[in-house]
Image: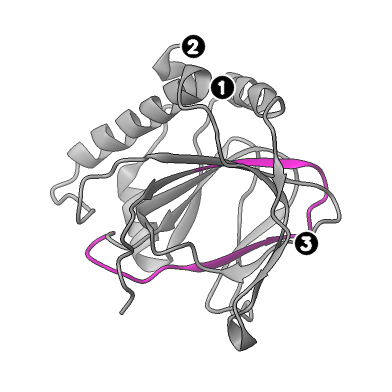
Amino acid sequence: MRDPLFFLSSFDIYVLIDALATEGAISVPLLAESARIELLREAKSFWYEPEVKTLGKGDQIVRTEYTACNNVPQTGLYGDFKQAFQTLMDEACDRLKVYPFSVPLNFNQLVIQQYQPGQLGITPHRDSLRAINLIALVNLCGEAEFYRCDDRQGTNSVRLDTTPGNIIFLRAPGFLNRRDRPFHLLSNIRSTRYSLGLRQRIECPIHPL
């Protein structure tokens, strides 16, 4: 598959930057249907491990119930996709007058999460401080509800579009020299869902304000 076939042609970096700056998250229809089908077909062949956990204490508790493939091959189809997505973002950022990240954007982690109907999903949480600049969640298939919210109680929840082919972008530390991260959750899983996450992971986290 050649790189241009991975994505639709209607990607607006200015809309993305504005939404991330003001809301912290946005869902964008971006993945070409042929690419979605091929990525999904391969995702179904991977090995997934249970992620059923309760993390934190008191009012900091986060609960998870899904399975994950944390060793997504970075060669072959998924390697090509990661490189194409990196190129897409690099070329889009080149059109901006001011580069939006504190260090160069470099996606180096791929994770696929699989959710089954009836599972909990993930309660309101923020991504790890080791994930910087930008997080992209590629909706490969399935029906579920994804929300951005203000806190771990789910206050002021705003639903984002999880239509297969949409990519949900989340602000991470390093975006516009900010350190705040949006709370978000996934729930009400109605059919088997596969979601590919692309992150820039570092060893030493950027400490929050």
Quadrant of the drawing holding the C terminus: bottom left
Picture quadrant of residue 19: bottom left
In this view, the mark in front (1 or 3): 3
Secondary structure beneath label 2: loop
Q: Residues within 10 Å of mark 2 (few under 14, many from 20)?
A: few
**Image mark for residue 189:** none
Labels 1 and 3: the sequence-earlier one: 1
Q: Residue at x 57, y 41 (%)?
A: 70
**Would you name the residue on which mark 3 appears?**
120
**Would you name the residue on which mark 2 appears?**
1
Labels 2 and 1: the sequence-earlier one: 2
**What is the x, y in percent for residue 171?**
39, 59
In the visual, does 98 lie left or right of 118? left
Circles 1 and 3: CB atoms closer than 8 Å: no
Circles 3 and 2: CB atoms closer than 8 Å: no
Labels 3 and 2: the sequence-earlier one: 2
Q: Residue furthest left?
A: 97
**What is the x, y in percent for residue 116?**
81, 47
Q: Residue at x 32, y 37 (%)?
A: 89
Find the magenta span and give its range: 175-197
Residue 67 on the magenta segment = no
* Spatial separation of the CA atoms under disc 1 and disc 3: 28 Å
Q: Residues within 10 Å of mark 1 (few under 14, many from 20)?
A: many
Circles 2 and 1: CB atoms closer than 8 Å: yes
**What is the x, y in percent for residue 79?**
44, 24
Q: Relative to residue 130, is residue 161 depicted above or below?
A: above
Which amino acid, mark 2? Met
**Would you name the residue on which mark 1 appears?**
35
Secondary structure beneath label 1: helix
Q: Relative to residue 43, is residue 176 depicted above or below?
A: below
Q: Residue at x 26, y 35 (%)?
A: 90
Give whichever of 155, 196 is nearer the camera.
Answer: 196
